[in-house]
Amino acid sequence: MELLHVNYKEEAIELIEGMEKCLLAMGDNFNDAVLIEDIFRNMHTLKGNSAMFGFKVIADFTHRLESVYELIRSGDIKISKQISNLTFSALDHLTILVNNENVLSEADAKAHKDISEKIVEIIKNTTGKKQQNNSLEKHFGNNLNTESELTEWHIRFCPNENFFTNGSNPLHIIEELRALGECKVIANVDNIPSLEDYNADACYTSWDIFLTGNITSSRISEVFQFAAHKSKLEISQIEPIEPLLPAQQIIETSNLPGLKNINQTIQNSAEKLTEDKKKHIIASIRVPSERLDNLMNLVSELMTLQAKLATLTEQNPQTDLLAVSENLEKISTRLRDNAFNMCLVPLENMITPFHRLVRDLAAELNKEIEFITEGTETELDKNIMEGLSDPLMHLIRNSIDHGIEDPEARLRLGKKKHGEIVFKAYCAGTNVFIEIQDDGKGIDPEKIRKKAIEKGIISSNDILNDKEVLNLIFLPGFSTAEQVSEISGRGVGMDVVKKKITDIRGQIKITSQVNIGTTITIKLPITVSIIDGLLVKINGEDFVMPLSSVERCYEVPAGHQLNRFNNLIVLDGQQIPFISLTEEFDSIENLSTSKEIVVVYYDEKKVGLIVDRVVGKFQAVLKPLGKYFLQMDNISGATILGNGKIALVLDTNNVIEQFLNKKSV
C-alpha cells in the first residue's frame, strides 16, 4: 500500500503542475475553452484519486474548486483575474496538502479555511437564485428545492476481479454517486465463492444503484472515468413517473431476460474498452527513480566487466573468445544507450516553476515581463536535472530583479514596455547548452571593476578585458546591489551558482551589453554516469580525458623544441598554447623521449596538453572519489580499467584554469 501512496503523490503533483501550466499558458486570455477543459479534467482526476486513497480533505477541497470550473465550463460564470489568482493559491495549498498528507500547521489550516470560503463565495455569488441552487445541488448534493425536472437512473456496476490491484476502491465511487442526489444501493454478492476458493485480493461484489436528481448521463460517466476499463458498467434512464423500487423487487428484476441481453451487450462493449485501455497503458509505464539508478549501476558494472573481458582477450587471443568479446561489447553498448535514454528527462518538466516565478515576482516588482521558452524538449540526465533547478531559479530571479527595468524606464530608453526573458536549450554533440537571455539594462563592466577594487579583489593597476571583468561576478561575496533585499543582493548567489554547475560537470559563462541585455550560457554533459574518454599515461599513471573536449592528438618527437617562454607550439601551421601535465603533476619532464600532445577545447579556444602517451579510446564508468578528495578540483572522478587498476578522470577545464591562475600570480 505504501508504494500505491507514493504513486498517488507523484501523480497528484503532476496533475497540480498540469493545472498550473494551463493557467500560465492562459495568461490574460480567459476565454480559452481548451485550457479550461484541461484544468477541469485534471481537477476531476485529482479529486477521484484522492477519494480513492482516502484523502478526504484533498478530495473535498478539490471538489469545491472543481465546482467553480464546472460553472465556468457551462458558461454560468466567466473566469477572471480574481478566479485565476485564487486558483493559483488553491494549487499551492493543494501541493502542501499532498506533501503533508492532510497534516496541517496552524497557518496552513487557516489558509485552507480562507481559500475554501473564497471558493464557496464565488459559487454563491453566481447570478440567479435558481442557477445557484441548481449548481450547489449538482456539486455538493444538498437537497435544495428547485424547479428543474428530476431524472432517475439505474446504474449496474460490476467491477472485474482484479479491480483492487492498483488501489481502486468501489466504495469511493459509490460515495461520489451519493453526493449527486438521492441514492439507493443494492449489493449483489451471489458471485462470492466458497472459503477455500476465496481470494482476499479479488473483488466479487457488484452493485445496482438507483440515483435520482438533476443529473445527466455524462455526469454519471465522469464518476466512472477511471474505472470503466476494469469493470462492466450499465447506465440507463428510468421513466420519471416510476418510483424507486423496493429492494426485493430490485433483486427479482435483476434476473429478467431482457436485462440479461442488455448486460451481455454492455459486457461485450466493456471488454473491448478494457482491451483498448490495456494497449494504451502498456505503451507507457511509471518507474520509480530508484530502479533507474539501480539499472544504471548494473550497466556500469557490466561495462567494467566488458572492459576486463576485452583485456583478457588481448592477453589470450583466441578466435572464439574474440567473437564473444566483440558481441558482448556491441550488446553492452546498446544496453548502455537504452539505459541512458530511460534516464533522460525533457527540460519542459522543470519549466513550470520558472513561469510561475516570473509571473509572481514581476507582479511584486511592478514589472511587465514575458517569459519565452525554446527547445524545452531537449533531454538531460535526471541526476543533472536535479542539480540544475536551483541555479536556474537564481539566474532567472536575477534577470527579473536586476536585469529587466520597470516599464517607465524601458519607455525612456526607447524599449518595449514589457521586458523579455528567453530560456533557450539545444544539443551540440554530447553536450546540452542552456541560455538565459534578457533584454534588460545589462551589466556595466566599469561598475564591476570599481566594486572589485573597493573590495580588494583586484588592484587599480590590473588590466582585465570585459570578459574577465564579468567573470568577477562569480567570486564569493561579490555583489553590485546597492540595497539588500529578500530577492537578491546578499552576495552569496553567483559563486554558489557556479559551484553547483561545476558539481554536475558543467560550465557557465556570461556576456552582456549595457542597455541591450545579458546572456548567461550553461554547458552541460548529457549524462554523468558513463563517458567516452581518452586513456592517457602521465608519469606512468593512467588518466582519462573526456572525449567530448578532445579535438585531436599529435606526436611530439624527442628533442622537439618547445617555446618555453610563452608556452606555444606550432601544430598544422597554427600556434597553440600548451601545458605539460608531467610538470603540472609535480614531476620533471624528460625531454629526451617523445611525447604526445592532446589538443582540447577550453572556452572555445584550443589548448594542448602534453602527456607521455595516448593509449586509446575508453568507456569510463565514473565513480565519485569521496569526501577526502573534494579539494582536487582538477579531478572529476575515477574509473576502473580492464586490468583492475584505477584511473583518475581529468577535468581538463579546471586543469587549464589552475595553470592560468598560477601564471597570473
Image (cartoon, rainbow, N blue to C red):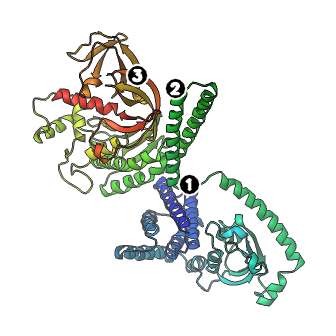
Residue 445's spot in the image, x, y percent? 21, 35
At 47% from the left and 44% from the top, the residue drawn is: 381
Nearest the viewer among 51 and 341 is 341
Query: Tag 3's secondary structure?
Result: strand
Say above or below: 378 vs 40. above
Q: Quadrant of the C terminus?
A: top left
Question: How many numbered marks appear?
Answer: 3
Q: Residue furthest right?
A: 257
**Image spot of residue 233 (x, y percent):** 75, 70
Q: CA distance from mark 1 to mark 3?
A: 41 Å
**Which residue is tagged 3?**
614
Q: Confirm whether residue 410 shows in the render.
A: no
Nearer mark to the viewer, of 3 and 2? 2
Spatial distance from mark 3 to mark 2, Cα to Cα? 20 Å
Q: Is residue 175 above or below residue 13?
A: below
Query: Which of marks 2 and 3 precedes in the sequence?
Result: 2
The residue nearer to you, when weighing 240 against 580, is 580
Is there CB contact under 8 Å for labels 1 and 3?
Answer: no
The residue at which mark 1 appears reads as 287
- How crowded is the residue under tag 1: few (<14 C-alpha within 10 Å), some, or many (20+)? few
Residue 361 appears in which quarter of the rendering?
bottom left
User: What residue is pinned by disc 2?
Assistant: 315
Disc 3 marks a residue whose amino acid type is: Val
157 left or right, relative to 567? right
541 sits to left or right of 257: left
| Closer to viewer: mark 1 or mark 3 | 3
664 left or right of 551 in image: left
Q: Which numbered disc, 2 or 1, marks the residue closer to the eye?
A: 2
The amino acid type of the residue labelled 2 equals: Gln
